[in-house]
Image (tube, rainbow, N blue to C red):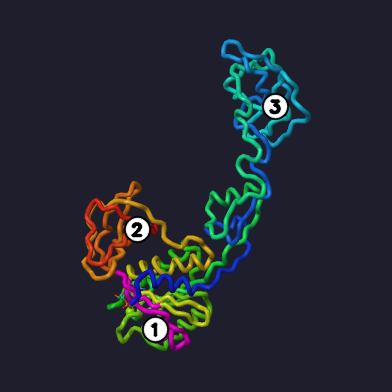
Amino acid sequence: MLEFEEALARVLGAVPSPTSQVVPLSKAAGRVLAEQVRSPIDLPVFDNSAMDGYGLRAVDVASAKPDSPVLLRLAGKIAAGEVFAGEVPAGNCVRLFTGSPLPPGTDAVVMQEATHVESSAPGQVLIHAPVAPGENVRSHGEDVKRGSTVGSAGELLTAGRLGLLAAVGLTDVRVGRQPVVGLLATGSELQEPGLPLASGRIYESNRLALATLIKRAGALPRTFPLVADELAATSLALADACEQCDAVVTTGGVSVGELDFIKRAFQQIGGELAFWKVAVRPGRPFAFGCCRGKLLFGLPGNPVSALVTFLLLVRPALRRWQGAANVSLPAQPGVLVEPLVNDGGRRHFMRVKVDPVGNICSAGIQASHVLSSVALANGLVDVPANTTLIAGTAVRVLRWD
Ligand code: AMP
Ligand code: MG
């Protein structure tokens, strides 16, 4: 039986090197950047006004006060998107709006609220306050310099990152290719939802939960039909899924019962098992192997075990496959508001609910068939073997919601 870290290292070691493709920015959300991106332009592209007001020379209004304003001649108006022809002479100002290019000759913007225009003299502006040179001006290149890095290889493309790439004028990016992940649920008791349950049957739920997590890991799930607990059917289904996908995730049939066929079927189609069994709870029976360059993840059937082993051992592989620099679940520090008791001999990744300020409660009954506590949980806490973490203990929650 492997320790979790050893199992994870072996899984990550077996992931093929990422390959990449170019996609439009509009399709790149959630993908992983495959190369460093440099800005082709400066941002802001030109000096521009940070507010609605008047562009002027700061030196012209140095003496302006609320009760003794300085009078300037209005030389024109520039809307955002327009440009001023020529240079603004001393003693003049120009009406500007947020984003209007600062006209040549001016070096500051006085905000509209500190100005006054008499309706009888629309060509003159009274300035009631001084401004420093550069005030209310968004300077050319202060945000991004041309040639500077605006994205790094291995980085996840978030809304903010995509906004920046669009602002510097890029239209597409090179990203890691997404592995196609086949999903097989094995178990003769399993039934597709939508019909009343036959006796002895249960509704199948792992494929939907795992497809959701696969998508959220940036990969492409492909769901296959249910597989009965028979060697021939299991081998056929596995061979088909391996053929069509980059990796196959199965649930159920991976333990020691005589009706557990995943490992045998995998070997029958020419696969090589790298390891089986990991010293974690839930989810000890976890099989991992390779078949002609395709990876097989044999997850236990219990829904909680399937979900937790996916998060701990499959999700990192899917992220690495796309070239992600960071493959672990985001960790949030927090404090237990009630004890977490692990009286077993294996470390237990316990389901918890953590609130925004870091108070952590158990999500409920921790048995590996209990789905209501999975539905309630938003994270896992790694509790060492034979350990009680008392209320008040500071821990890290692995967030997966
Ligand atoms: P197994 O790993 O095949 O021994 O299954 C362990 C437990 O998980 C059994 O109670 C199964 O009925 C249940 N189970 C297996 N696969 C699924 C599934 N896809 N959806 C819901 N329950 C499942
Ligand atoms: Mg089974």
What amino acid type should be assigned to the residue bearing mark 1?
Lys
What amino acid type should be assigned to the residue bearing mark 2?
Gly
Q: CA distance from mark 1 to mark 3?
A: 76 Å
Name the residue at 61% across, 55% down: 25
Res. 379 mark: 2
Res. 106 mark: 3
Name the residue at 27% across, 70% down: 346
Q: Earlier in the sequence, mark 2 or mark 3?
A: 3
Residues tagged 2 and 3 counted as in contact (Cβ below 8 A)? no
Which residue is labeled 1 in the image? Answer: 263
Q: CA distance from mark 2 to mark 3?
A: 55 Å
Secondary structure, mark 2, is strand
In front of the other: label 2 or label 3?
3
Q: Which residues are magenta?
A: 262-287
Secondary structure, mark 3, is loop
Residue 200 percent across, percent down from the top left: 28, 78
Q: Quadrant of ligand 1?
A: bottom left
Q: Is residue 6 above or below residue 149?
A: below
Nearest to the observer: residue 370 or residue 30:
30
Name the residue at 47% across, 80% down: 290
Residues tagged 1 and 3 counted as in contact (Cβ below 8 A)? no
Q: Earlier in the sequence, mark 1 or mark 3?
A: 3
What amino acid type should be assigned to the residue bearing mark 3?
Thr
